[in-house]
């Protein structure tokens, strides 16, 4: 893939324009336009025509195109399937909350983590997304929907920490005051538990929220639904989370998919309390979204409520995630997989 100006920081872009013999102020003009979600250099009306032509020839913008767009009639959630410049597709979900509009973006085309309950990983990893391809999901969701984006979750297709360097660059770009200027405190990054990368992230002391997909209180269960646990078991993962908190001062958010008969018993809840003792954490209980190819089923509402009650009585704040977009394949990977099957990709 050719170099894309949108993956560059402002100083890097300044160096490119300096090589083209342009005055210093041009870089900020180009940077601002790119971070508004323009599709062509012709839209950059305050640039000389010769420079627009020069940039178009050397640095294509490569904006994504909407393949499918589905809007929930229940809650207004919008799901996009974007076609990238190489023909691959990724998903983005726009969710509306009382505190603002949140966009859930993908970080990879496919995923190699193999979690049993997730459609994103069926078919494996195709490739990692470039920084500009992550930024474009935020930008063009905002442009297409006409809704201002205030929050971002990296929880779509792919494992963000498996694409560490590109994700770190994306975070720098989307946080840039000259760009979208979205606060790190409004960004949540989800991981299935790549312990070395959690430790590397801790050293950066970013003020984002780290969301850890735990989904089980012990190795015997987690091994069966999350292959990553065989590389980094629950003890290693929870220790890395404790160290992350010590390093950053940021409370960990744990994701826990409630799976009927697998991880949702009262004994599981009590063991989870024991394992989390002394770790400032929030537990996000997620009613499982059924994936057609998976035999796993969601827990009953009664089991979810009892699980939540046990955690809260034990001192761990726990919320049950509101299900959004259930009528539009809003779970990770479902729309992409459906589209690929229809088109035999």
Image: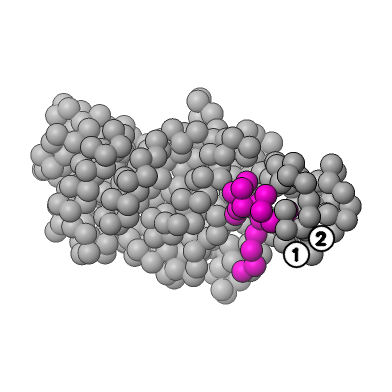
The front one of 86 and 326 is 86
Examine the rendered structure and indicate whether residue 281 appears above or below residue 154: above
Residue 215: x and y, percent? 26, 49
The front one of 172 and 308 is 172
Q: Which residue is mark 2?
A: 54
> Quadrant location of residue 250?
top left
Image quadrant containing the C terminus: bottom right
Which residues are drawn in magenta? 1-17
The answer to whether residue 226 shows anywhere in this view is yes
Q: Which residue is mark 1?
A: 58
Q: CA distance from mark 1 to mark 2?
A: 6 Å
Q: Secondary structure at mark 2?
A: helix
Residue drawn at the location 22% of the way across and 48% of the way down: 240
The answer to whether residue 273 shows anywhere in this view is no
Residue 226: x and y, percent? 27, 60
Q: Give left or right: position of 291 versus 175.
A: left
Residue 95: x and y, percent? 53, 38
- The prevailing secondary structure element of the residues shown in magenta is helix
Image quadrant containing the N terminus: bottom right
Residue drawn at the location 28% of the way across and 57% of the way down: 196
């Amino acid at each position: 893939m050719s170099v894309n100006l949108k993956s560059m920081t402002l100083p890097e872009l300044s160096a490119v324009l300096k090589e083209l013999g342009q005055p210093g102020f041009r870089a900020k003009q180009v940077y601002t336009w790119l971070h508004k979600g323009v599709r062509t250099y012709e839209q950059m009306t305050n640039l000389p025509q010769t420079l627009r032509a020069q940039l178009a020839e050397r640095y294509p913008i490569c904006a994504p195109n909407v393949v499918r767009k589905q809007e929930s009639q229940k809650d207004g959630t919008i799901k996009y399937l974007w076609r990238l410049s190489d023909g691959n597709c990724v998903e983005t979900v726009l969710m509306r909350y009382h505190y603002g509009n949140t966009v859930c973006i993908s970080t990879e085309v496919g995923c190699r983590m193999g979690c049993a309950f997730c459609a994103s990983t069926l078919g494996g990893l195709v490739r990692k997304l470039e920084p500009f391809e992550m930024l474009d999901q935020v930008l063009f969701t905002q442009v297409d929907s006409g809704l201002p984006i205030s929050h971002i979750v990296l929880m779509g297709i792919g494992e963000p920490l498996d694409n560490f360097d590109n994700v770190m660059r994306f975070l720098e770009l989307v946080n840039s005051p000259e760009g979208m200027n979205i606060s790190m405190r409004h960004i949540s990054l989800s991981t299935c538990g790549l312990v070395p990368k959690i430790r590397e992230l801790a050293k950066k002391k970013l003020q984002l929220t780290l969301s850890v997909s735990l989904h089980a209180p012990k190795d015997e269960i987690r091994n069966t639904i999350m292959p990553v646990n065989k590389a980094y078991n629950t003890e290693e993962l929870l220790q890395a989370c404790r160290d992350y908190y010590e390093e950053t001062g940021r409370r960990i958010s744990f994701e826990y998919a409630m799976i009927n008969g697998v991880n949702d018993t009262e004994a599981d809840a009590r063991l989870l309390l024991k394992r989390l003792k002394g770790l400032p954490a929030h537990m996000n209980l997620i009613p499982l979204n059924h994936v057609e190819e998976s035999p796993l089923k969601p827990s009953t509402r009664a089991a979810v409520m009892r699980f939540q009650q046990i955690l809260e009585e034990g001192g761990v704040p726990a919320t049950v995630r509101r299900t959004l977009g259930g009528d539009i394949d809003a779970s990770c990977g479902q729309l992409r997989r459906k589209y690929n099957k229809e088109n035999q990709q």
